[in-house]
Image (tube, rainbow, N blue to C red):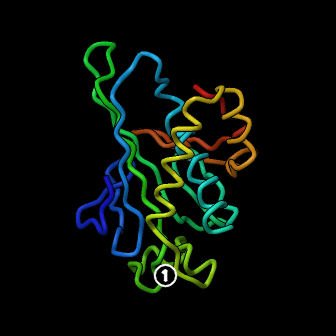
Amino acid sequence: LIAKEQTDAYGRRGRDWHSPRGGLWMTITLKGSKEIDLNMIPIITAISIIKALKKTTKIEAEIKWPNDIQFKDKKIGGIICETEIYGEEIKWIMIGIGININIQTNSFPINLRQKTTSIENITNKKHDIEKISKEIIKEFYKNIKNNKKDIIAEWRKKEQTLKRKVFILSKNNKIQARVTDITYD
């Protein structure tokens, strides 16, 4: 499912997501299966986006764990995964993908302009959104069949959170830590 724009979009933890015309706002829905490893879905999606952007726009994007796609520390996209589970049975998985493609940074809300960019701003040209979406889907279905170890190895190469200090937030605590590794689970 692909939308030209979204008027009530949200990201992780219900955060607002700005998704005007010119971006790629896409959902991939998978029917549940015992073979699907839920922990791998965001990782496979991120790798698929990175590869598709390299092929279609030539940019070298990176992953900021757990669900951001970035270019030089500025967010260009995000992933949100939602599931419906009955007991131990996965009914479906919805993978929301949002990528700022043909959007000028000055059109973003003021509070997002310093930490967000678009592929058009990076490359100084417009890109074919349909071509990018098709490449993401192609990469996703290819990568979902790959070995977990291979996917994780690829992900680590593009993961910018490794070796950095992070804050882990819970209802009552804010803990500072250093990410030493990220595994498939």
Residue that appears at 40% across and 75% down: 22
Q: In x, y percent, where is residue 154?
A: 72, 41
Question: Which residue occupies the foreground of this view, 109 or 23?
Answer: 23
Question: Is 86 above or below relative to 93?
Answer: above
Point out the image quarter for the C terminus. top right
The quadrant where residue 123 appears: bottom right
In this picture, residue 65 sits left or right of residue 179 = left
According to the picture, the residue beneath numbered tag 1 turns out to be 105
Question: Which residue occupies the foreground of this view, 54 or 121?
Answer: 54
Packing grade of label 1 (10 A; few <14, some 14-19, many >=20) is: some
Q: In x, y percent, where is residue 63?
A: 62, 52
The type of residue carrying mark 1 is Thr
Residue that appears at 68% across and 34% down: 152
Counting the numbered discs, the total is 1
The quadrant where residue 176 appears: top right
Residue that appears at 40% across and 41% down: 81
In this picture, residue 55 sits left or right of residue 168 = right
Question: Is 115 above or below relative to 8?
Answer: below
Q: In x, y percent, where is residue 159?
A: 68, 48
Q: In x, y percent, where is residue 6?
A: 27, 65
Residue that appears at 38% across and 44% down: 28
Secondary structure beneath dot 1 equals: helix
